[in-house]
Image (spheres, rainbow, N blue to C red):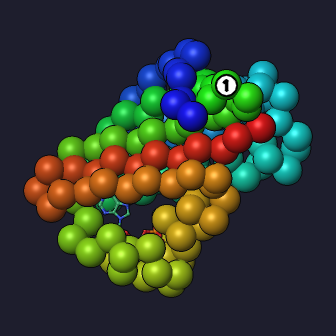
Amino acid sequence: MAIRVVSTESMEIRASDDVVLVRQAVRKKSVALGFGLVDQTKVVTASSELARNTLDYGGGGRVHLETVENGTRSGLRVIFEDQGPGIPDIKLALTDGYTTGSGMGLGLSGAKRLSDEFEIDSKPGEGTRVSILRWK
Ligand SMILES: Nc1ncnc2c1ncn2[C@@H]1O[C@H](COP(=O)(O)OP(=O)(O)O)[C@@H](O)[C@H]1O
Ligand SMILES: [Mg+2]
């Protein structure tokens, strides 16, 4: 069934403080949707990792928080976009422990595991878009 966007809110990710603001905004939306504490924490943790990547590897970007529904269920979709260097090998980047920085290499793979739907689209030299969705 087609996904309908009920409401949307965008924020810039330019500095570490913005990552904190993203966490807070995602928490707020998940509470408003009636997510339980475990689901709230899953989507907040995944969003935090992706916001960090947008900042650290993408050179900053934007996040879109969407309340969605598919006729029977409502959910929260969080989309991260940057115009950074992109990811040359997405499969490799999704491997547990793979990092080109000083992280643990568990952000992308963790975000995927914590989400019901996960999409990543990246083109070297153009940027990266990562979308996660958690249904209630
Ligand atoms: N937005 C992005 N732009 C460019 N590269 C990225 C982006 N997000 C992730 N990557 C690449 O994928 C790798 C794995 O990311 P992640 O699993 O979050 O681990 P970590 O952040 O610990 O490096 C990063 O080290 C980086 O090379
Ligand atoms: Mg990371």
- Viewer-proximal residue among 17 and 58: 58
- Viewer-proximal residue among 5 and 65: 5
- Viewer-proximal residue among 71 and 130: 71
Task: Tell me what residue is drawn at x 53 percent, y 47 percent.
Answer: 132
| Residue lying furthest front | 1
Task: Tell me what residue is drawn at x 49 percent, y 65 percent.
Answer: 108
Assign a secondary structure to mark 1: loop
Crowd band around label 1 with a 10 angstrom C-alpha radius: few (<14), some (14–19), many (20+)? few
Vertical relation: 31 (above or below) 108: above
Q: Left or right: where does residue 133 sit relative to residue 129? A: right
Task: Tell me what residue is drawn at x 52 percent, y 31 percent.
Answer: 2
Vertical relation: 109 (above or below) 61: below
Residue position marked by numbered label 1 in the rendering: 71
Q: Is residue 119 something one can see in this rendering?
A: yes
Q: Left or right: where does residue 71 sit relative to residue 51? A: right
**Residue 78 at x, y percent in the picture:** 53, 38
Amino acid tagged 1: Gly
Vertical relation: 112 (above or below) 78: below
On-image quarter of the N terminus? top right
Q: Left or right: where does residue 17 sit relative to residue 15? A: right
**Does label 1 point to a residue whose CB lies under 8 Å from ligand 1?**
no
Q: Is residue 15 something one can see in this rendering?
A: no
**Residue 123 at x, y percent in the picture:** 18, 57
Task: Tell me what residue is drawn at x 21 percent, y 45 percent.
Answer: 83
**Residue 100 at x, y percent in the picture:** 33, 77
**Residue 57 at x, y percent in the picture:** 32, 59
On-image quarter of the C terminus? top right
Quadrant of the rendered image containing residue 93: bottom left
